[in-house]
Image (cartoon, helix red, strand yellow):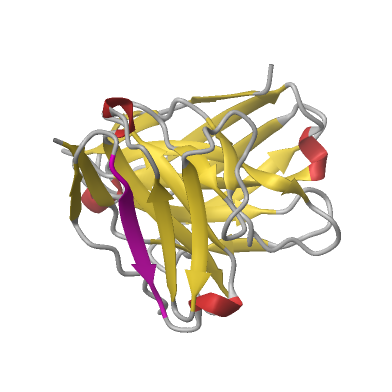
Amino acid sequence: SYDLTQPPSVSVSPGQTATVTCSGDGLGDKYTCWYQQKPGQSPVLVIYQDYKRPSGIPERFSGSISGNTATLTISGTQAIDEADYYCQAWDSSTAVVFGGGTKVTVL
Amino acid sequence: EVQLVESGGGLVQPGGSLRLSCAASGFPFSAYGMTWVRQAPGKGLQWVSSTGGSGGGTYYAASVMGRFTISRDNLKNTLYLEMNSLRAEDTAIYYCAKDVRRSTGYYQPRSGFDIWGQGTMVAVSS
C-alpha cells in the first residue's frame, strides 16, 4: 500500500509562516493536494495539483513539491487558519491516499 | 450554487446494510468524477470509493472492497454508496465529494476534490 506521512502537529505565531510537510515514495511524480478541516466542518480544498489554488482560497496558502516531499505553506498565518490539514495523492496501486493529518495551532 | 447533499445515514446493526445518497446541483454532474470519503470519530480522512463521470473508472479502498458498491444516476444527478456486511469499524461520517477537474475518458482521481457535502453519519452498533 502507499502511505503519506505528515507531522502530527505544527505550531505558529500569528503573522508568521507555517509549513506542513507530506512525504511519500515517488511523490514528486504524482499530484498532491491539500485540505483544510476545521472542527465540525467538511474539508475544504486549499491546494490541488501541487501548487494550484482554487478560487476563493487566500493567496497566503501555497504549495510546492521537492523530491518525495510536498509542502503546504501558510504565509502571514491568521487565527482563522487554525485547523487540521490533510495532504492527498493518487497512487496507481492504492488509488486515493490521505495523509494522517497535521493540526496547525496558532499560538 | 454548486452543492452536494448527503442522506441515508443512521444506526445499523453489525452485518446490516445501508444505502447512502448524494444529491448534486449547480454543475454538470455527468462530467465529473465523484468520490466517497469517511471520517471515523476523532480520526483522519479515509478514502472509500471513486467513480468516473461517464467514461468508466471505479475504485475501492481495500477495507470496503466486496462489501460496498458505488454507483451514480446521471439523470437524477445523484451518487450512491451501497454498504453491506457493515462492521463497527465502518462507523464514520461519510462525505461525498466532486473532482476538481472534468472527467475525460477513463477516470483517475488524480487532482483532488473541490466540493464536499456536509456528511451523513453512519453508526454500526448492536
Q: Position of residue B119 (x, y in %)?
A: 42, 29
- The residue at the far top in this view is B1
Kindly tell me whether residue B4 is visible in this rendering.
yes
Q: Position of residue A24 (x, y in %)?
A: 40, 76
Q: Is residue A46 magenta?
A: no
Q: Is residue A39 left or right of residue A95?
A: left
Q: Residue at x 36, y 27 (%)?
A: A41
Q: Is residue A81 above or below residue A49?
A: above
Q: Is residue B20 above or below residue A16?
A: above
- Front-most of residues A39 and A60: A60
Q: Residue at x 45, y 25 (%)?
A: B118
Q: Is residue A49 above or below residue A54?
A: below
Kindly tell me whether residue B82 is visible in this rendering.
no
Q: Is residue B125 left or right of residue B97?
A: left
Q: Is residue A18 magenta?
A: yes
Q: Position of residue A78 (x, y in %)?
A: 31, 30
Q: Residue at x 41, y 31 (%)?
A: A42
Q: Quadrant of the N terminus of chain A?
A: bottom left
- Front-most of residues B11 and A7: A7
Q: Is residue B30 left or right of residue B33?
A: right
The prevailing secondary structure element of the residues shown in magenta is: strand
Which of the 4 quarters of the picture holds residue A104?
top left
Q: Position of residue B107 (x, y in %)?
A: 74, 61
Q: Which residues are magenta?
A: A16-24
- Front-most of residues B52 and B114: B114
- Front-most of residues A19 and A54: A19
Which of the 4 quarters of the picture holds residue B24?
top right
Q: Quadrant of the C terminus of chain A?
A: top left
Count the marks: 0
